């Protein structure tokens, strides 16, 4: 880009910087006093878990680029180093906000008679309980290592938290140092002590082990013990589905000499750890100058807060929202026939995902069904979806499942399920070489009367369907169903010249079709026809689409976006005339559906599907977005977007600054919470139509 082009261009927020802004929105939700107390703990856990994954993958990628010595990648290297510095500054700032919020929430827990006790706060009966817990549950999982015998701590897993223990013998100056990994998977992170007089008592497993150190080191001559926690995040590997060109990936892989998979790249330790012990820990971690080293508090791995015991206090959590049954899909009527009569729509978790499972179960036993094809990206632990597909195969249906083996952190689970499906007679396809299959589609082949298809914005996953907002379109539209079949043909024969009549499919023509839709809005605005763009999406970072949205807003097109995560747009440029507005919602459900609405000169076009506007989605994955023609379904999708854009209770302003300011509430009006309004709408709809 020339200096002149830079001067005239709009700002672009780098993906990883925008991700930090997004994760802070989760932290800000945890700080809201009106959020139920145990939900605030859960948001703190989500924030921490997200940060771990970010450092393991994205910061690992930046670290590799920053250390690359290929001269042709000087610009990329400089950008990576600048981003690492900015991210570390934000991380330090947000760590203080996290600590302040954690202290405030812990204080509120005490007001609610829930006490987190340290080892030095136990009375005799509680100490006796902890001792018994050690002998009956904990002791068999504790295996201390002498630090002097450990070659490198990066040989240990970064899934654990560790206690660095300093031991002394009476009357001797020297000290010995040991390492204890916390057996969280086996014993849980929180140990609940007996309730007493209306109070609930818990301990971190860290403190239970601190209390038990004399028992752990029985048989030695040590008389004093002190333990300090630390954790580290490893370099998982160069992200293979990232936004880098293949050639660039190869150059970086060749140019990096010093960093290897498994190196520690983020270390958090107890600020009270003695200097001599800290020095030994850092030596074993082989810290690099670009690594993040952060002095923290007494406890780490706050992701475990997502599983904090509720102590029977349901009043400190969100009230249960029971999914509504869709009357048009109610039991007693064939779902296959119902879809033939007209498009059907599910909005989970407001409506029950069981309707999709019921569709598969009916297909598995119907003599009219000859085949079922579906894509699976992530699978529930005890997947009803897979069980229905296996039933179909055993009943003689031709069942094909495309399963993505590279779904990050679900690889092992997907491989295990693949073997079970193959044993049941299912034809399993392991994605496409060079492309992740991220589309969410199902095709049901019928013996007569026309085939059916399901297109979803999210995974066919019962667990996700209870926590993620997603939309499923069930249709018998011949052209759309034929296109879904063509997607499966493309997956089986990738890179073949297949054209799609209705669907927007990447990596084929999705990007160019979205560009065309935005260009049409610009032309309509110039011609005086209705022109607007309203999009609900997870991420927008792809530069062509970012520039197109800037161009549309500058041309006077009204552009309203709901973006949950990464967003590279900046809304404050004066040339945009206030036409670009972006909101982000963090609430009890994770906003996950992707919906695209274009004015189209008054003949509104509505789309939904699996794709975000990131390079990986538009260029390096198999994604599917479908047009929606049924007027009832279009109205449903418009309502979802409209409610989200009207949210003033849980939405914040995403303007590129990272401040995440709350959306203003009009004078005399109550804050509007879109998720609550949608829940009430679907409940009322179910009651009304019943």
Image (cartoon, rainbow, N blue to C red):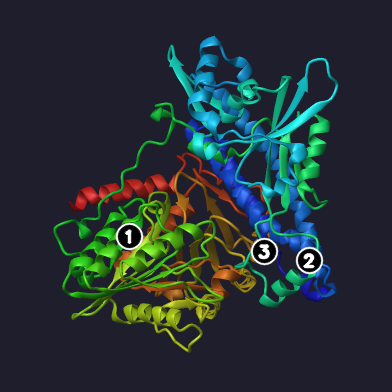
Comes first in the chain, label 1 or label 2: 2
Locate residue 141, reporting x and y percent.
55, 34
Q: Residues within 10 Å of mark 1 (few under 14, many from 20)?
A: many
Residue 75 lies in quadrant: bottom right
User: In this rendering, is residue 215 above or below 484?
Assistant: above
Give the alpha-carbon distance from disc 1 to disc 2, as whole Å: 43 Å
Q: Which residue is mark 1?
A: 385
In percent of the image, x 79 and y 70: which residue is there? 255
User: In the figure, is residue 367 to the left or right of 78?
Assistant: left
Q: Which residue is mark 3?
A: 238
Comes first in the chain, label 3 or label 1: 3
Q: Residues within 10 Å of mark 3 (few under 14, many from 20)?
A: many
User: In this rendering, is residue 88 above or below 14?
Assistant: above
Q: Which residue is mark 2?
A: 256
Is the C-beta separation of discs 3 and 2 under 8 Å?
Answer: no
Label 2 sits on a secondary structure element that is loop
């Amino acid at each position: 880009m020339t200096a002149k082009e830079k001067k005239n261009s709009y700002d672009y927020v780098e993906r990883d910087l925008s991700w930090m802004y997004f994760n802070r929105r989760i932290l800000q939700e945890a700080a809201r006093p009106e959020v139920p107390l145990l939900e605030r703990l859960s948001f703190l856990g989500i924030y921490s878990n997200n940060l771990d994954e970010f450092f393991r993958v994205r910061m690992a990628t930046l670290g590799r680029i920053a250390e690359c010595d290929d001269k042709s990648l000087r610009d990329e290297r400089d950008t990576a180093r600048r981003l690492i510095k900015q991210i570390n500054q934000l991380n330090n700032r947000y760590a203080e906000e996290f600590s302040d919020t954690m202290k405030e929430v812990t204080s509120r827990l005490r007001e609610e008679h829930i006490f987190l006790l340290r080892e030095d706060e136990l009375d005799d009966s509680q100490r006796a309980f902890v001792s018994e817990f050690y002998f009956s549950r904990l002791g068999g999982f504790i295996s201390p290592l002498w630090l002097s015998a450990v070659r490198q701590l990066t040989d240990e897993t970064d899934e654990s938290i560790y206690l660095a223990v300093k031991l002394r013998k009476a009357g001797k100056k020297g000290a010995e140092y040991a390492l204890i990994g916390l057996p969280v998977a086996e014993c849980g992170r929180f140990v609940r002590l007996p309730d007493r007089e209306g109070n609930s008592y818990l301990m971190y497993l860290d403190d239970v082990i601190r209390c038990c150190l004399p028992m752990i080191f029985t048989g030695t001559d040590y008389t004093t013990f002190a333990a300090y926690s630390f954790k580290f995040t490893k370099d998982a590997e160069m992200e293979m589905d990232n936004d880098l060109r293949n050639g660039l990936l190869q150059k970086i892989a060749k140019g990096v000499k010093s960093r290897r998979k498994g190196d520690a790249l983020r270390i958090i330790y107890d600020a009270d750890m003695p200097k001599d012990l800290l020095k030994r820990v850092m030596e074993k971690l082989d810290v690099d100058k670009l690594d993040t080293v952060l002095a923290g508090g007494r406890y780490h791995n706050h992701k475990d807060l997502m599983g904090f015991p509720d102590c029977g206090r349901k009043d400190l959590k969100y009230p249960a929202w029971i999914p509504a049954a869709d009357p048009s899909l109610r039991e007693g009527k064939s779902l296959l026939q119902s879809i033939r009569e007209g498009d059907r729509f599910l909005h989970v978790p407001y409506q029950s995902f069981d309707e999709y499972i019921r569709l598969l179960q009916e297909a598995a036993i119907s003599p009219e069904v000859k085949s079922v094809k579906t894509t699976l990206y992530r699978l529930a632990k005890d997947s009803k979806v897979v069980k229905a597909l296996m039933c179909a195969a055993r009943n003689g249906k031709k069942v094909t499942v495309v399963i993505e083996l590279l779904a990050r952190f679900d690889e092992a689970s997907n491989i295990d399920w693949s073997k079970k499906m193959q044993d049941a007679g299912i034809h399993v396809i392991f994605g496409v070489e060079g492309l992740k299959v991220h589309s969410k589609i199902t095709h049901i082949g019928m013996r007569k009367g026309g085939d059916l298809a399901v297109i979803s914005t999210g995974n066919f996953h019962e667990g996700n369907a209870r926590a993620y907002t997603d939309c499923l379109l069930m249709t018998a539209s011949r052209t759309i169903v034929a296109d879904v079949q063509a997607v499966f043909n493309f997956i089986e024969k990738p890179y073949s010249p297949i054209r799609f009549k209705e669907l927007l499919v990447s990596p084929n023509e999705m990007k160019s079709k979205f560009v065309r839709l935005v260009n049409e809005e610009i032309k309509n605005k110039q011609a005086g026809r209705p022109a607007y763009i309203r999009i609900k999406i997870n991420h927008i970072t792809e530069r062509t689409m970012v520039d197109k949205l800037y161009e549309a807003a500058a041309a006077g097109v009204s552009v309203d976006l709901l973006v949950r995560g990464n967003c590279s747009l900046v809304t404050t440029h004066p040339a945009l005339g206030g036409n670009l507005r972006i909101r982000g919602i963090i609430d009890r459900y994770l906003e996950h559906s992707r919906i695209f609405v274009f004015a189209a000169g008054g003949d509104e076009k509505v789309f939904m599907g699996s794709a975000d506007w990131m390079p990986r989605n538009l260029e390096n994955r198999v994604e599917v977005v479908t047009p929606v023609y049924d007027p009832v379904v279009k109205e449903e999708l418009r309502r979802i977007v409209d409610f989200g854009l009207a949210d003033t209770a849980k939405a914040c302003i995403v303007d590129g600054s990272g401040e995440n300011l709350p959306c203003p509430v009009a004078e005399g009006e109550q804050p509007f919470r879109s998720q609550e309004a949608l829940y009430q709408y679907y409940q009322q709809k179910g009651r009304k139509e019943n």
